[in-house]
Image: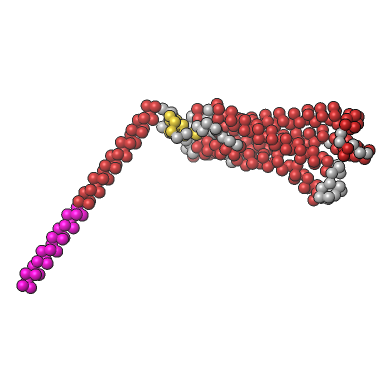
């Protein structure tokens, strides 16, 4: 009886072993067939995708343009709104610069006319606002520098007070120019990047010149028509009582008005200095690009 039980257990173990071997073989076969099917599907999808791209050329997928040139695909966003501010414009220019530095061919059509004009307009409006703010701070600079208004409660300016009003006046134009320059002088300036930078800087230059000249003309017009002592004396009786009380206040206000024209010139000077800083950064970027290209020619 014992030997028959042992024989029975041995038979059960051999059957279990055969089931395990057969199951493992089936699993390996299933895995191999699945892997082959996946590879065939991936290859078919890749071939079909390349065939469609070759047949259709540029096409739009989820807000992107895909263009093929010299066996390279370049994608550019086609958002109907386009770049919204200066940071968006600079980010796109950085992307073009990196692609050109890595040797990726970018077709000229990657930058549409609408895209380029948005670069121009954003640069224009950003620096028009900069010049307007600079005009106000320059006016305060002239008043404080001539002792017409107090700085920290004192009409006699200390060294700290003078440094403060200078920094206060320079803050807007210089910070904007350094913000743009810090990015432009680091860039590799290829053909497409150069085109984008040209439109952006054209807008910056046009906005600066337009608003600076407008401020100079407006300051002269306002002063000689309404703010000279003679003209102000004629309109002073019609002013509120707080502005129409005594010779001392009349003299103080006319002295304030005399700084309108110098303030306009200070604003124009600072604005043109900011544009000059941006121009220098572009020159530095081009010199760096030429150096990189020269090294590439040597090593090739």
Q: Is residue 286 visible?
A: yes
Q: Position of residue 96 (x, y in %)?
A: 52, 36
Residue found at x 90% / y 29%? 234
Q: Is residue 241 left or right of residue 50?
A: right
What is the chief secondary structure element of the magenta stretch?
A: helix
Location of residue 119 by image quarter: top right
**Does residue 255 appear in the picture of this structure?**
no
Q: Which residues are magenta?
A: 1-25
Which residue is rendered at x = 80% and y = 41% of the image?
141
Number of marks drawn:
0
In which quadrant will I find the N terminus? bottom left
Measured from the top left, where is residue 241 in percent x and y?
88, 37
Seen at 26% across and 43% down, the residue is 36
Residue 218 against residue 102 in the figure, above or below:
above
Apparent side of residue 246 relative to residue 85 in the rendered image (left or right): right
User: Which residue is more in the foreground, 222 or 134?
Assistant: 222
Q: Position of residue 225 (x, y in %)?
A: 85, 27
Q: Position of residue 102 (x, y in %)?
A: 49, 39
Residue 280 image-quadrant placement: top right
| Colour mapping used in the image | secondary structure
Q: Residue at x 83, y 41 (%)?
A: 143
């Amino acid at each position: 009886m014992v030997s028959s039980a042992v024989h029975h257990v041995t038979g059960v173990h051999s059957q279990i072993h055969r089931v395990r071997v057969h199951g493992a073989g089936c699993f390996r076969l299933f895995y191999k067939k699945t892997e082959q099917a996946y590879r065939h599907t991936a290859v078919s999808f890749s071939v079909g995708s390349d065939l469609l791209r070759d047949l259709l050329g540029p096409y739009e997928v989820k807000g992107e343009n895909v263009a093929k040139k010299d066996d390279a695909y370049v994608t550019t966003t086609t958002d109907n709104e386009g770049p919204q501010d200066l940071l968006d414009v600079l980010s796109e220019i950085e992307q073009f610069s990196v692609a050109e530095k890595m040797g990726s061919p970018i077709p000229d059509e990657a930058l549409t006319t609408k895209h380029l004009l948005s670069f121009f307009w954003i640069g224009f409006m950003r620096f028009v606002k900069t010049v307007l703010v600079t005009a106000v701070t320059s006016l305060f600079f002239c008043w404080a520098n001539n002792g017409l208004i107090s700085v920290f409660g004192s009409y006699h300016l200390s060294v700290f007070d003078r440094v403060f009003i200078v920094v206060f006046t320079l803050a807007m134009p210089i910070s904007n120019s350094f913000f743009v320059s810090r990015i432009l002088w680091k860039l590799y300036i290829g053909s497409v990047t150069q085109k984008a930078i040209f439109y952006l800087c054209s807008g910056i230059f046009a906005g600066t010149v337009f608003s600076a000249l407008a401020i100079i003309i407006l300051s002269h017009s306002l002063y000689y028509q309404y703010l000279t002592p003679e003209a102000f004396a004629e309109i002073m009786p019609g002013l509120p009582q707080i502005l129409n009380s005594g010779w001392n206040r009349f003299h103080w206000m006319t002295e304030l008005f005399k700084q309108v024209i110098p303030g306009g010139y200070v604003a124009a000077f600072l604005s043109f200095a900011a544009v000059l800083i941006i121009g220098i950064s572009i020159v530095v970027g081009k010199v760096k690009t030429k150096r990189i290209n020269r090294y590439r020619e040597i090593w090739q």
